[in-house]
Image (cartoon, rainbow, N blue to C red):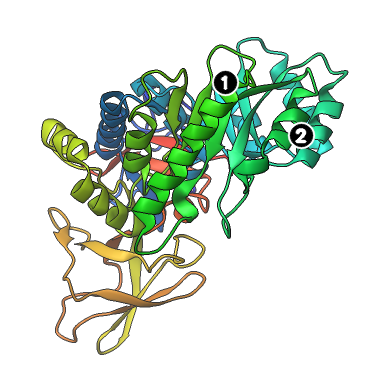
Amino acid sequence: MNRETNLQNFDADILPFEKGSGDRHTLSAKGWNILAEEVSFPIAVLREKDITHNAQWMQQFSEQAQVKLAPHGKTSMAPELFKLQLKSGCWGMSLATIPQVVNAYHQGIKRVILANQLVGKFHCQQLLDLLNDEDFEFYCFVDSIENAKWLGEYFADKNATLKVLIEIGVEGGRCGWRDLSNIHQLVESIGHYSQLQLSGISFYEGVIHGDDAENKIVEFIDNIKNLFIQLQHDKAFNQQEVIITGAGSAWYDVVAKQLTTNTASLNFTPVIRPGCYLIHDTGIYQEAQNTVSKRSQLACDITDNIGGDLTSSLTVWAYVYSVPESGLAIIGFGKRDAAFDAGLPTPELHYRPGDTKPKKSPSHWQLTIIMDQHCMMVIDEKDDIKPGDIISFSTSHPCLTLDKWRKIAIINDEYCVTKQMTTYF
C-alpha cells in the first residue's frame, strides 16, 4: 500500500485520520474503503472475521486432539498474526530462519521452534543475545554428527544452553537422520557436549507422497514413537518436558492422531506445526483441507460447532486495465503481486465503482497468462466488463503472495481497511 501506518498490535485501536489534514500516516476512524477507491491498487487484503474464525478452528482442533500448536510463522511473517495465534492459545511459534526468529523475538514472541538446522557462526552470534533472556525458550533441529559437534564446540564457552531436537527424515526427503538403527551415534555426539540439551524429536511428513502416503506416514510416526521409547529408556533426554513435533498443513490430523494413540504411558508433549491454516487459500490448501475433512471426524465436528471449515482470508484486488479485444481482459496485477507457482489466482468478485456492492465473478472468467504486473483473463465477448472495474482474486499457496507485500490491509465486512499489518520477510 502507498499509505503506511505505524505498526500496531492486531487488536489495537485504530488511529484517527482526518481526510484533508495532510497526515498520511494514520487511518481514518472508518478506514479507507476499497470500493470507494481510497487505496492504491493492486492491494492485498485479509478479512478479519476469517482470520479470527480460522484461528479458533485450529485452536479447537489442537485442544480436542490433545496436542499443542506451534504454527509455522514463515507463511505470513507477520508478528501481529503471531500474537493473534498465541492469544488464541497456541503453545509457541515455529520459524524457518534465524532472521525470522530474531524478528519474532523483538515483537515479543518468547517460545520458538526453529524448524530447521542451526548452521553458521553469524546466526549463532545473533541467537546468543536471545538465549541470554531467561524467558526465551528456543529449540532447533539437529540431524548430523557434524552439526552437533560444531554447535557443541561453538556454545562450549558461551554460557548458554541450546535445546536441540533430533530430526528424523525419509529417503529422498529433506533434512533429517535417515537410518534409525545407527542413531546412537548422533545421540552420543549430542550427549558429549554439556551445552547441548537433547529435548525431543522432530520430523516433517509432508515429503511423503504417493497413493499409500497415509499408511507410510502412520508407519513413519510409529517408528518415531518407538525411537522415543528407546531414547527414554536410555535416559538420552536431559530435561523434564520432552517434545515430539511434526505436521505441516496437509497431514496435521494424521500426525495428531498418531502422536496421541497408545502414548498415555509415554512422557512427551506432542506439538504440531501447520502454518497455512490462518490464511488458507482456494487452491492446494483447500484441497488438503477437503481431504482432512474426509478422514477426520474431529475436523467435521469442529466445523459444525463453530459454523464453518477453514476459509480463505486473503484476496488481491486489482483494476481492469484494458479490454483490447473480444474475449480478453487485461488486469493490473501480476507475478510481483500474487503467487502463481501452485495455480493462477482465481477471480472471485467483480465491482464497478458506483455500484452498491460487488457481484460474484462469472465462473468462466479465468486467468490464462500472468506477467510481472499484468494478467490476461479470458472472458465471454458478451460480458459486461470495462476498464476501471475492480476484480477481487483469491490465490493458491498464500506464503508466496504474502511475501510480496510489506503492508497487508485488514478489512471488515464493509470493505474498509481497519488496520495495516507489517510483514518481515
Is residue 261 at all visible to an observer of this figure? yes
Classify residue 61 as left or right of residue 396.
Answer: left
- Residue 91 drawn at (x, y percent): 44, 22
Residue position for label 2: 148
Assign a secondary structure to mark 2. helix
- Residue 400 drawn at (x, y percent): 49, 55
Hey, what amino acid is under mark 2? Ala
Residue at 48% from the left image edge and 40% from the top image edge: 223
Classify residue 195 as left or right of residue 81.
Answer: right
Assign a secondary structure to mark 1. helix
Residue at 36% from the left image edge and 46% from the top image edge: 251
* Badge 1 or badge 2: first in the primary sequence: 2
Residue position for label 1: 233
- Quarter holding the C terminus is top right
Residue at 38% from the left image edge and 45% from the top image edge: 218
> Which mark identifies residue 330?
none
